[in-house]
Amino acid sequence: MKRPTLLDVADHAGVSRATASLVVRKSPLVSQTTRARVEAAMAELGYVYNVGAARLRASQSRTVGVVVPNLTNPFFAVLLAGMEAVFETERLAVVFANSNESLEKQTGFLTRMREHGADGVIVCPCEGTDSRLVEDAAAWGLPLVQALRYVPETVSDYAGIDYRAGMRHTTERLIALGHRRILFVSGNRRHSAQGDRLEGFRDAMRAHGLDAGRVIELPLTHMAAREAAAGIAAAPDRPSAVICFNDVVALGLHRGFFDLGLRLGRDISLVGFDNVAEAALVVPGLASVATMPFQVGENAARLLLRRIRMPDAPVERSVAATEFVERESLGPADPAA
């Protein structure tokens, strides 16, 4: 038997071919009654929408790529869920990749996306990324959005978080509670998110005449942070409060301080960053800074869709504000100390 065409479906349902096409493309312009009649005709005739042919007609692959530096961090899982929620409504296939902070892996993934005709990509640039990320994408005609991190002095759409203001506000909260010896536990990777957090901490400390040099760098793992807890606690001028680059580090220190018998919120205060779900589950609860990764993921996806549809549109930046979440790991400084 001849394979049924969209025209066959339209004739069977008593609508125009254009209306039938709107139905298979999930357009909101079709009434529910007409949609039901066309879908019934499709089922009765055994019509199957030929995505490959539609792709050739539209000169689009209906595929987008997303590369992030660390899929083991639960923060990125929520970020990707936000992106997928938007892309799913547009019936786009999403290819995720983990660069693991490797420039070689990131470059290889972007090359494959170009070879397979991806309609666009979202990139959270790994350490060492330079302006060639944006320059190459422009030369290839590949729509690009930077997310969470950005390469300085490049011009592209960007969806991120106001890390600097969030860290500055958090440090101010600790200072208001009487803390003066505040330690910032930073990551050991160089990128915009690390620099913005560090500058936010230093801005607040300098504004109050406090030591802005209390900074240590660690690999962003639970184990590295847990092992570092003893050294922090044994320091002659032990900090009364610790702010962490993210919640992965903070949760590692949470366990490390517990192992040492320190009471969080009393002997030492501890604050994370990102407010992952585990921050509310540990005891005592971990104070943290909510960064809305689902919202940021949605913003990045919408920016990419906009860029795909309007290649010559002005560059747009979408920067989400943070929100401090106070929990039991945070307390006032001990006046005696």
Image (spheres, rainbow, N blue to C red):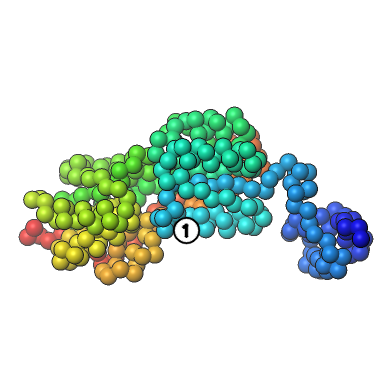
Q: How many labels sit on residues? A: 1
**Which residue is located at x 74 percent, y 46 percent?**
55
**Which picture quadrant has residue 75?**
bottom left
Q: Residue 269: where, in percent of width, then height? A: 21, 60
Q: Nearer the viewer, residue 220 or 157?
A: 220
User: Can you see residue 10?
Assistant: no
**Which picture quadrant has residue 206?**
top left
Q: Is residue 45 left or right of residue 232?
A: right
Q: Is residue 307 left or right of residue 223?
A: right
Q: Amino acid at mark 1?
A: Val
Q: Which residue is mark 1?
A: 78
**Which picture quadrant has residue 72?**
bottom left
Q: Is residue 65 left or right of residue 265?
A: right
Q: Residue 151: where, in percent of width, then height? A: 44, 36
Q: Residue 108: where, in percent of width, then height? A: 52, 38
**Which residue is located at x 75 percent, y 52 percent?**
51
**Looking at the picture, does residue 202 appear above or below residue 174?**
above
Q: Nearer the viewer, residue 287 or 57?
A: 57
**Looking at the picture, does residue 254 appear above or below residue 311?**
below
Q: Image quadrant for the N terminus?
A: bottom right
> Furthest residue to the front?
1
User: Can you see residue 50?
Assistant: yes
Q: Image quadrant for the C terminus?
A: bottom left
**Secondary structure category for the residue under label 1:** helix
Q: For label 1, count other residues whose C-alpha is less than 10 Å away and answer few (under 14), some (14-19) or many (20+).
A: some
**Which residue is located at x 22 percent, y 44 percent?**
215
Q: Residue 83: where, in percent of width, then height? A: 55, 54
**Which residue is located at x 46 percent, y 45 percent?**
99
